Image (cartoon, rainbow, N blue to C red):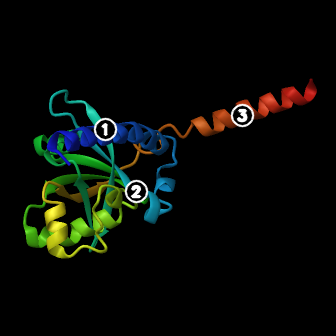
């Protein structure tokens, strides 16, 4: 495959993920985030990283695959250095993470050491469900050398969780929609019965 064709496919994949990410973020905001990871072998394990835009200073939200390895949290930027969220973390490593089991503040750091990188990288890719195999990376079948070569441009991020968060502005912030929607539907059903 030529480089220009590969670049075109990569750009299409990035656009596709941006659309999918908006949908996943909405699910997190309405309180369904933990359900996204209910079938990890298919859809993967998904968390949301809340980071600061390097140019705008605004809060940005990015759903990513993750794995917890020996109690530590890892994720990967599969598009490498061109990923906006990765570049934002490089500019400001202070983040929040929305996980199925809780909401945390943390500090993100890139794992560069090849000895320390390969095991967590493999686990994150396994935790991506069908995503890694769709792009030709088979973490359960590849040797260490093959995996290192296939993920040479990927960026592995370790997030050191600092403290638990609660309050407004986090996962489930729009969960009030469910009772309102339920009341509207019930009133419509009752009205229909009377007619």
User: Marks 2 and 3, how far apart in space?
Assistant: 28 Å
Q: Secondary structure at mark 3?
A: helix
Question: Left or right: where does residue 56 sit relative to residue 9?
Answer: left
Residue 132 x %, y %: 32, 59
The residue that label 3 is drawn on is: 183
Residue 54 drawn above or below residue 133: above
Observer-nearest of 13 and 17: 13
Q: Secondary structure at mark 1?
A: helix
Q: Kindly identify the residue that appears in the image at 14 percent across and 64 percent down.
A: 149
User: Marks 1 and 3, how far apart in space?
Assistant: 41 Å
Q: Secondary structure at mark 2?
A: strand
Does residue 12 appear in this view? yes
Where, quadrant-wise, is the C terminus in this rendering? top right
Question: Left or right: where does residue 84 sit relative to residue 190?
Answer: left
Residue 125 drawn above or below residue 53: below
Depth check, mark 1 against mark 3: the one in front is: 1
Residue 22 drawn above or below residue 132: above
Is the Cβ of the residue at disc 1 closer than 8 Å to that at disc 3? no
Which of the numbered marks, if any, corresponds to residue 143?
none
Q: In which quadrant of the rendered view does residue 76 lie?
A: bottom left
Residue 18 x %, y %: 34, 38
View extreme (right): residue: 194
Is the Cβ of the residue at disc 2 closer than 8 Å to that at disc 3? no
Q: Earlier in the sequence, mark 1 or mark 3?
A: 1
Q: Earlier in the sequence, mark 2 or mark 1?
A: 1
Q: Kindly identify the residue that appears in the image at 38 percent across and 41 percent down.
A: 21
The residue that label 1 is drawn on is: 12
Label 1, residues with CA under 10 Å away: few <14, some 14-19, many ≥20? few
Q: Kindly identify the residue that appears in the image at 29 percent across and 48 percent down.
A: 96
Residue 68 x %, y %: 31, 67
Which of the numbered marks, if any, corresponds to residue 102?
2
Residue 30 x %, y %: 51, 41
């Amino acid at each position: 495959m030529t480089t220009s064709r590969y670049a075109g496919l990569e750009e299409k994949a990035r656009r596709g993920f941006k659309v999918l990410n908006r949908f996943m973020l909405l699910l997190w905001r309405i309180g369904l985030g933990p359900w996204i990871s209910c079938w990890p072998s298919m859809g993967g394990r998904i968390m949301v990283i809340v980071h600061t835009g390097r140019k705008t200073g605004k809060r940005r939200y990015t759903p990513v695959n993750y794995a917890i390895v020996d109690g530590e949290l890892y994720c990967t930027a599969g598009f490498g250095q061109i990923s906006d969220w990765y570049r934002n973390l490089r500019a400001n490593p202070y983040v929040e993470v929305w996980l199925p089991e809780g909401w945390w503040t943390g500090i993100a750091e890139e794992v560069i050491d090849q000895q320390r990188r390969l095991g967590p990288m493999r686990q994150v890719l396994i935790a991506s469900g069908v995503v890694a195999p769709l792009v030709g990376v088979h973490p359960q079948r590849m040797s260490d050398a093959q995996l290192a070569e296939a993920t040479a441009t990927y960026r592995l991020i370790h997030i050191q969780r600092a403290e638990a968060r609660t309050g407004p502005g986090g996962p489930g912030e729009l969960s009030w929609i469910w009772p309102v929607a339920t009341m509207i539907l019930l009133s419509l059903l009752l009205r229909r019965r009377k007619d």
